[in-house]
Amino acid sequence: MFRRTTKSRGARHAAAAALLAALLCVPAACGAQEAAAVLAKGSGLYFEAALAFQKALGRPVQVYDLAAGEPSLPRGLKAAAAFGSRAAALKYPPKTKLIILLAPGYTPPAGSRATAVSAFPEPAQALAAYKSLQPGLARLAVFYRGAPGAGYTAELAKAAARLSVEILPVPLDAPEKFPDALRALAGKADAFWLLPEPALINKTSLKVLSEFSCAHKLPFYAPSAGLTELGAAASFAPGVDEAATAAADAVSRALAGEALPATLYAPRSSLTVNEAFSRRCGLPVKPHGAAGGAK
């Protein structure tokens, strides 16, 4: 006979926050509070990222869990890593340099002192990965929504010129627009890539993209490794650890007084390949010749 014990949602939040605080901050070392980590919630993906951030930073920082309420941040805070859009939108002391990660689709207000660790992979690395997977790739359609995606596709176009790849930008404002956009691409693209745009990603849109890919033998490149298994040829994207490492480096640079750009890319990304889907649909990709990190 056994007895199942359960905890309330609030108790689980408190336990996660307490563990994170214990791991991230040694009380004696956190007195100055020059840096902090602010989490949209102290569990799940944000928790994992915060642990990777602390490991990469190599120094204790105070952690704040917004699930426990809005924090009172020290006025002397020099740098803060904001995990998630809710944490990024928090009001910070005027002189705080903000590093944002795990917030796809969030755009910092004009004139802010924020640097975003992009959810997109470094353009040249991404194109090299997809070109190695699909040697015949000459025209890559890129689905995106909003200003960050538009800026990224412009960077992609510059990097693509060196690989003789043409970027076909396809802006969309809603996932319901995918069927028409895909039909318009027939015969004009060799593959299509959906950027990490939360407003465009749902079960229906992923199914539409996957079915079109298979029917027309056009590789669909997914925005993240986790979505690849839902019916995509591959994905090339930074993982949580890579984003956290980039954020830790940015915080260190900010504390040293170094100026930072508005956007930073993770130093590396991983290529994940869905070989079973590619074989079943007869997609023109060569998984075994893919770059390191392929699965």
Image: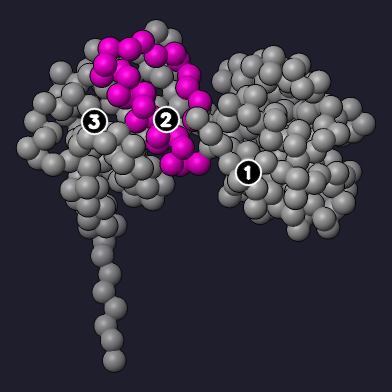
Disc on the earlier residue, 3 or 2: 3
Is 123 situated above or below 20?
A: above
Q: Position of residue 237 (x, y in %)?
A: 58, 37
Residue that carries the numbered disc 3 in the rendered image: 36
Q: Secondary structure at mark 2?
A: helix
* Rendering quarter of residue 75: top left
Identify which residue is drawn at 70% across, 30% down.
128
| Label placed on residue 246 | 2
Left or right position of 7 against 171: left
Q: Residues within 10 Å of mark 3 (few under 14, many from 20)?
A: many
- Which residue carries the number 1 mark? 292
Contact flag, marks 1 and 3 (Cβ < 8 Å): no
State the extent of the magenta-drawn residues as a range: 239-266
Instruction: Give the residue drawn at x 79%, y 52%.
Output: 278
**Which of the 4 image quarters holds residue 34?**
top left
- Percent position (x, y) of residue 277? 77, 55
Task: Tell me how far mark 1 sits from mark 2, CA to CA.
Answer: 20 Å
Q: Is residue 36 shown left or right of residue 208?
A: left
